[in-house]
Image: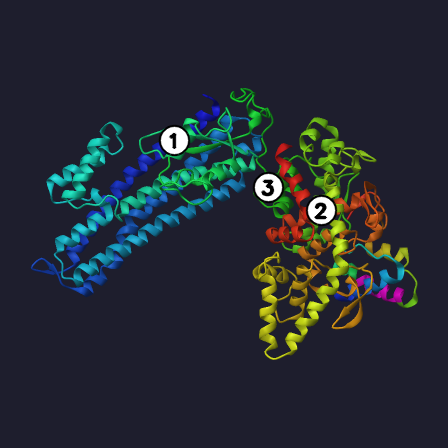
Amino acid sequence: MADILESTTKYRIKQIEIAEAEYYQQLTKVLDKIEDDITSLANKMLPTTDGKLINLQQAIAIRPQIKAILEKHYLPFADRVVRQGFSKQALRVEKAFKAIGFIPPEFQELTKGDLALVKNLKQQYFTQFKDISNTFTRTLSDKVYQNTLLGSEFTELEKELRQSINGIYSSSNDPQMNKLVDYVKRNKDDLSKATLVDKAVKTLQTKFGADRAGNNMKRYAGQLLNDSLRDFDATLNFNKSKDAGLTYVKYYGDIIPTTRQICRSLVSGSLNKRKNGLFTIDEVKSMWSSRSWSGKKSGNPLVVRGGYNCRHQWSFVNPDWYEDEEVLKTKPLVPTPKEKKSTSIFGSVSEEESSLLPIAFGATASNFTRMVNKLPKLPPIKKGSPAYRYFTDEIRMPITQRNISKNLKDKYMFTHEYGHRIDHKLAQILHKDKKLAEKFMPTLTTDATLGEGVISGATEYQVQISNIAKKAVMADRVVIKNNIKKALGVMEQEKADLAKVFLGKDGFKKIKIKVEDIIKSKEFPLTIDEVTILLREQGMVYDPADLNTVQFVLQIKHKLLHSEYGKWANYTINNEVQKLSLRQINVDAWRTNGNLHFADYVGAISNNEMGFGHTLGYYKKSHSTGITQRGYGTITNRHTTEAFANYTSLSNSEHKAIYKKLMKHYAPNTTSGFDAIMERSNLL
Amino acid sequence: MMMEFSVLHLQYIDKFGDGFNTIAMSEDEEKALIPLMRRAVDTNEKIKHKDLEEILGKDFDNTEDFEI
C-alpha cells in the first residue's frame, strides 16, 4: 500500500540511515585518532628495557592521560550525535506528523512536553556514550598495567590497545592485514560484496587473531550510535502518537540478509491480523512477550522494535483513517485551520488560564489537557470563595488564593474547580453535538447512551459528563456503606492488639515490624515510601511506632475514613462493649491538600457515610441523576460532579500515581468509570 | 482543616443536623467561625445567617447554581 503513511515512515528511516552513515564515518575518524594518540602516548610514556615494559608507576600515571584523550576526541562526537542528530530527527518526526495531516493540528507540532522528552533523551543517550568512554578508559588503563606487570613486549601492548579501540579495524604494521582491514571498512555495507567481506573478516580473525565480536570500543560506540538514533525516533514517535490518541500501528522497513525473522514476518505481512496490516498496541505487546529471538531488547516493543541494530520502525495510525480495510483516505479528517494554529496543549485559553493551567494540569499532554483543549476561553476569574458557576461558566477564587504555584492547597482547589468546568462544559458540547455524543458515550453504560444527566438535563447547563459514571458511584456507595459496620470493629480491635504489643517487651521494635508487615502485605495498596509521602504532605512524619501513622495505615487497610455524620453502634473490643463511630476516628492525616480532596472524593461517592468536605445539605440540594437504591439513597448531580472534581485534582497531583491507587482501593468502580471517560478524550 | 475547627464542627453538626462545606474554606474563615460555633453549641442557637454572610460571603448559602 503506497500511502502517505508509508512514505513518511520511510522518510524517517531513510534520514536515520543517512545520519547514521555520516556519524559512523566521523566515529571511524575519531577512533582512528584515539588509537594513534594512545599508542603514541604509551610509546612516549612507558619506558622499556629490551623492548619489555618495566615501570609500574608510569603504567598507573598514564590513566588520566588516556582519559583525557578519549574525552578530547570521543565526547565532542557523542555531543554532536545527540545534540545535532537528535534535534534534526525530532524535526523530521514533526514533519512526518504534519505530512500525514489526519492528526489534530495541536498534536502535529512538537509540544513543550515533546521538547522536554527530547531534552531528557539527549541527556540519557549522552550518558550512555559517556559510559562507553569511561569503560574504555578503564579497559585501556588495565591493559597497560597488566602488560607492565607481566613485563610484556611493548608491541604486544600496542596491539592490544589498538584492538581494544578498533577491533579488527585496528591499524597494524602488517601491510597484508591493513589491506584486509581497509577492504572490510570500505565494503562492509555493500551487499554485493558480503561474501568477500566475510572471507576477509574470517582471515583477520584466524590468521591475525583480530576479533570483530570482541570488546572493542568501535563495536559498542557503533551500536549505540545506531540504536540511539533509532530508539530516539521511536520514543518520540511513540510519545507523540500516544498524545494524539493513535492506538494502531504498522511496521515498516526493508528486508536485508540479516533481518530478524520477526521483522521479516511483520514487514512481509505473514503475521497480519488485518488486511491493512494494522496491529493494536496490545497485539504487538503480546507478540513480543510470547516470542524470543537473538538480539531482542527488553522494553517497550514500540520503542525497542526488533532489538539491537534493528532498522525497522513502527508508524502509528487511527483505523478510522482507512476507508475500507486497505486504502488510506485521501482527505484529512481534520481540516487544516485557516487561523494561526495554537501551539498550546490547552488550546485557546485566556491570559489567566495560560498561567494557571500548566501548573494545575502540567505541561505535557494528557487526557485532561485534551479535554481542556476543547473548552472555550475561561471568563475572568471572580473574587469569592472557591466555586464554579455553571450557568455563567465562571470560576471564583479569592485573589489571595490564586498563586497556585506557591500554595499547594490552592493548586488542589483550582484544579478541583476546573474539574467542575470540564465536567459541565464538555457535557454542553456533547449536548449540542449529538454525533460527537454518540461517538463519545456508546460503549460506556446503557444510561449514558440515553444521555440522561449527561447530554440531557433540567437545563443544558446542568448536564455533566461525570453522570456517565452514576451507576458506578452507586455500586461503590453500596460497598462502602456495607463495609463500615464490620470494618470499624475489626480495625479498632486491631488497634487495641497493636497497643498491647506496644506496651509489651520490646514494644517499640515489635510494633514497627507489625505496622510495616501490614503495609507490605499484598492487600495494602501503598508502599512505605508512598505512605511517607502522603503523611509528609500533611506535615506529618512517617513513624510506624507513632499513633498517627498507625491509625493512618489501619484506616487505609480497612478502607475507612472519618465521617462527620457517622452513626454510633456497639462493638466488642477486648471483650468489652464499646460505642464506636466513624465520627471519632482520627482525622489528623486527612486535613488538607490531596488527602482532604481524597476524603471529599469518598464523601461525595458515599454521601458522607464516610469522608468529608461538603455537607449533606449541599448534596441534597441538587438534581437526582435517576439512580436510587433503597437503603443507600440517591445519586445526585452533586455527588457525581464533586467526585469528578476531586478525581481531577487528585489525578493531576504531584502524587497522582499514589492517589490513583488509593481511589481504586476505596472506590474502584467510580475510579474506573472516570478513567474510562478520560480515556475517551482522544475522540473529542 | 484546623483541629479545633473540626472538633467544634462535629458538635455543631450533632446539634443542628448539618454544618459547613469545609473543602473550600480558608484558614481565616475557619478561625472566624470557631468562636461563633462555640457559642452556638453552648447556647443551642444556630449561627445567624447575617454573621455567616460576613465570614463566608453573601451567596455562601445560595449554592443553587454553584458547585464548590
Q: Position of residue A395 (x, y in %)?
A: 74, 44
Tags 1 and 3 both on a single chain: yes
A300 to A328, vertically: above or below: below
Q: Is residue A100 left or right of residue A457?
A: left
Q: Residue at x 15, y 56 (%)?
A: A44
Residue sitting farthest toward the front: A575
Q: Earlier in the sequence, mark 1 or mark 3?
A: 1
Task: Say few, some or many: other residues with alpha carbon within 10 Å of mark 2 (under 14 / 14 to 19 / 20 or more).
Answer: many
Q: Residue at x 61, y 80 (%)?
A: A505
Task: Say few, some or many: other residues with alpha carbon within 10 Å of mark 1 (under 14 / 14 to 19 / 20 or more).
Answer: many
State the predominant SS element of the stretch in magenta.
Answer: helix
Residue annotated with mark 2: A645
B1 to A35, vertically: above or below: below
Q: Position of residue B16 (x, y in %)?
A: 89, 59
Q: Amino acid at mark 2?
A: Ala
Q: Earlier in the sequence, mark 3 or mark 2?
A: 3
Q: Nearer the viewer, mark 1 or mark 3?
A: 1
Q: CA distance from mark 3 to mark 2?
A: 16 Å
Q: Earlier in the sequence, mark 1 or mark 2?
A: 1
Tags 3 and 2 both on a single chain: yes
Residue annotated with mark 1: A264
Q: Position of residue A385 (x, y in %)?
A: 77, 51
Question: CB atoms at circles 1 and 3 under 8 Å apart?
Answer: no
Of residue B58 and residue A543, the one placed in the foreground of this image is A543
**Secondary structure of residue under mark 3:** loop
Q: Residue at x 69, y 61 (%)?
A: A555
